[in-house]
Amino acid sequence: MPDSLIEQLHQEILLARQRVYAVREPTPLEPVDIGSGVDVWVKREDIPPIHAYKWRGAYNKMATLSEEQRSRGVVCASAGNHAQGVAIAAQKLGCHATVFMPEPTPLMKRQAVALHGGSHVKIELIGDTYDEASDAAKAYAADHDAAFVHPYNDLATMGGQGTIADEVVTSGVGPFDAAYLQIGGGGMAAAVGAWLKQMMPGIKIVGVEGVGQASMKAAVEQGGPVRLDDLDIFCDGTAVRCAGDVTYELCKEVVDEFITVSNEEVCNAIRLFWEARRRIVEPAGAMGIAGMLQHREQLQGKRVLGVMCGANMDFAQLAVIAAEAGIGGQMRKHIRFEIGEEPGTMLSLIDNALAGCNIVDFQYGKTNERTGTPVIGFDAPPEVIAQVHEHCQSAGIPYQDITAHEDVDFRIVNYDPKLFKRPLIIRYRFPERPGALHEFLQRIKGLANLCYFNYLYTGERIGRALVGLEFDSDADRQAMLDRLRGDPKLRHSYRELSPEVLERML
């Protein structure tokens, strides 16, 4: 009989083979180019019917139960993927499952559970968080003498997840120098890491967690599972407040290095995978690639494994991901500059301080007669961002990096309409390409001064901005209108606001 937890887990993975492979064929390994000469392969666990790997552990655990146990029904708690895994296992094994989900669980995920489980599943919406749903599920299981199917802290569940590594080993693609495995509760990382280390001696296992949800890293640092006070749920598939006691012991032994990735880095990894495979994965699914990108330079010439562990994401979340991902893998920064209110200063700022940057966000409102504080968001590689800082410092331009500040995130554009001189407020359209915004400012140079500007890149071919122009005289204002109406390039690019909207703004 195996003595250590690792040996018990190895045994569970061996036993899981016959169960898991009787239900579904192995998922493919596919190459993904992340640059810098890194040979990256990802396990496509976003392909199965539930678009996630969780069915492996749920099915294996439920298949280990006796007929008598299954006849009393099973219970689980989940915000999404594990619930779908339990649902599909209940349908295939012919038993009943009661699934507890938090009340805010998106309709898409609830519908997916019902679709896969059919009459074999009952959904209970309890509480606002996974923890509340989990507590209710455990109480229900105890009251009804039903088996609780844990999403990660169970050796049989982990045995099912470990078949991912078994398929990697038998694929013929390896051996791998390193594997970057996302960690939520730690079940997949522990099982996959343990099997890879058994079969590929020398492989380095890197555990990847979100910055605001690194419960396993905290457990290892503090000598045991600890409960996080705050939990970021952007990567909801890995949002676990407290590591399991079993997964903690295993990850402590199996994982060689723990790293954290930001939500922005995850969004950039989603973008990279979309460009490489034309498939959108959920945030938790892209965390492994996000970790590789963080270590890209030190991975040159190495063969690296990742697990694309899921693709269950709300459509509405795409807007946030696109905004955070940056363009072409560059970093996104928001900087508040302090410049003079003299005509041409905004154009000078863009020409000089922001040369080489792709402007994706522009928030400005006049609040002072002498100085302006535009907030400009831009995408640029790190070396260009460093040049922006260097230029501002050498030119004596006061600035502040306010990336991720609340007023930027919620687009609070302050302005004082009493300071606007003979304002003309227009909606302006321009081609969404580098330099187009600069061309607009060049066209109005000498004719008008900006008093308001609100623009956000949307990924369309046409950019849309709400622009406020002010003038020293009525004649200058009329000259600008004549220019807009007479210039073929401008005539169809602008529209004046309705009187009702102007009244609200001014």
Image (cartoon, helix red, strand yellow):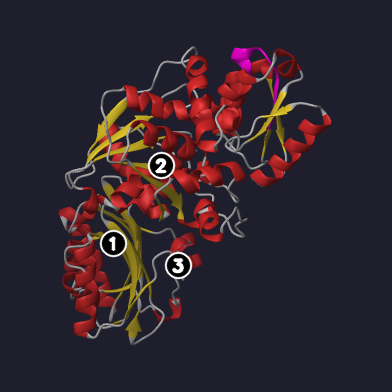
Is there CB contact under 8 Å for labels 2 and 3? no
Q: Nearer the viewer, residue 379 or 247?
A: 247
Q: Quadrant of residue 200?
A: top left
Instruction: Please report the residue visible at 47 percent of the width from the left and 19 percent of the height from the top.
Output: 17
Q: Is residue 330 left or right of residue 249?
A: left
| Residue type for callout 2 | Leu
| Residue type for callout 1 | Phe
**Residue matched to label 1:** 378
Q: Kindly state the secondary structure of the residue where label 3 is placed.
A: loop
Q: Earlier in the sequence, mark 2 or mark 3?
A: 2
Question: How far is disc 1 from disc 2 in space, using C-alphas?
Answer: 31 Å
Asked if one can make out residue 54 in the rendered structure from this viewpoint, the answer is: no
Residue 180 to residue 343: above or below = above
Whether the magenta-drawn stretch holds residue 124 is answered as no
* Place of residue 157 in the rendered image (x, y in percent of width and height, measured from the top left): 57, 30
Whether the magenta-drawn stretch holds residue 98 is answered as yes
Q: Nearer the viewer, residue 48 or 370?
A: 48
Q: Earlier in the sequence, mark 3 or mark 1?
A: 1
Q: Nearer the viewer, residue 284 or 4?
A: 4
Q: Which mark is residue 405?
A: 3
**Residue matched to label 2:** 181
Instruction: Please report the residue visible at 40 percent of the width from the left and 42 percent of the height from the top.
Output: 181
Q: Is residue 43 left or right of residue 38?
A: right
Q: Kindly state the secondary structure of the residue where label 1 is placed.
A: strand
Mark 2 is surrounded, within 10 Å at the Cα level, by few (under 14), some (14 to 19) or many (20 or more) other residues, namely many
Q: Quadrant of residue 118?
A: top right
Q: What span is in magenta?
A: 90-99
